[in-house]
Amino acid sequence: MRNKRVIKDALFEQVARVSKAMASPKRLELISLLSQGPKAVEDLAVETDMSIKLASAHLKDLRLSCLVETERQGKRIVYRLANTAVADVWVALREVAEDRLAELQAAVTFLGKRQDEWQGQDREALLQKVREGEVVLLDVRPSAEFEYGHLPHARSMPLDELKARLGELPTDRPVVAYCRGP
């Protein structure tokens, strides 16, 4: 019986190790960014408003917990998620928080209060309208993130190019834009 307890304790300790690595808001933000595609530590530092030293320390914690992997590209270290399961855990954690925490629900509601936003229909309904040509789906994330993965039939138009490229958009049907979120 004692051996089973030791094994159980060891198993839960390893799961706790991963949970502990994800217990930092900045590390969760890094995971969120990396779920959009591989990024250099310098870029991650800028996007998270951290110093390179602090971003590197957080990324080291994620690497030691086997949540991210690295690749050297010249002088730069590029990070990526270890696998899609890491992104799945991030999404599940975020969904639980959105469902269970009133503070997060209030923040999401506040951020989403726009009269011109897509409302009242789910992702599949939107994608059906896109397939039928009734709606144009616009991905406003950086091009590298679009290339890494995007919704079906989406057009890439990074936010920093949007103003200059507005003329490319149709005026006879709605345009729904999406990004990685807050």
Image (cartoon, rainbow, N blue to C red):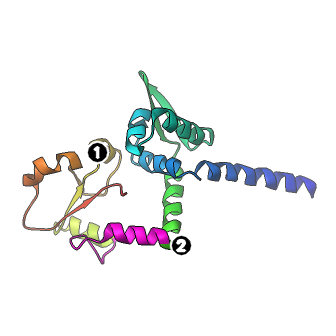
Up-down relation of residue 127 to residue 167 (above or below)? below
Q: Circle 2 is placed at which residue position? A: 100
Boundaries of the magenta span: 103-122
**At label 1, which amino acid type do we have?**
Pro
Q: Earlier in the sequence, mark 2 or mark 1?
A: 2
| Residue under the image location 22 percent in, 50 percent down | 159
Q: Dot 1 lies on which element?
A: loop
Residue 182 found in image quarter = bottom left
Question: Which residue corresponds to the image point at 41% horizontal and 33% vertical from the top-left?
Answer: 42
Q: Is residue 30 visible?
A: yes
Task: Tell me the residue at 42%/45% (across/down).
Answer: 48
Q: Nearer the viewer, residue 54 or 136?
A: 54
Q: Position of residue 65 (x, y in %)?
A: 62, 43
Residue 125: image location, x then y, percent: 29, 73
Q: Quadrant of residue 110?
A: bottom left
The nearer-to-camera label among 2 and 1 is 2
Q: Pick the quarter of the image with the N terminus.
A: bottom right
**Residue type highlighted by circle 2:** Arg
Residue 148: percent from left, percent from top: 35, 45
Residue at 46% x, 26% y is: 72
Does the stretch in magenta take in 119?
Answer: yes
Task: Return the residue at label 1.
Answer: 142
**Horizontal side of residue 48 vs 6, given as left or right:** left
Crowd band around label 1 with a 10 angstrom C-alpha radius: few (<14), some (14–19), many (20+): some
Q: Where is residue 123 shown, x and y percent of the image?
A: 33, 68
Count numbered badges in the picture. 2
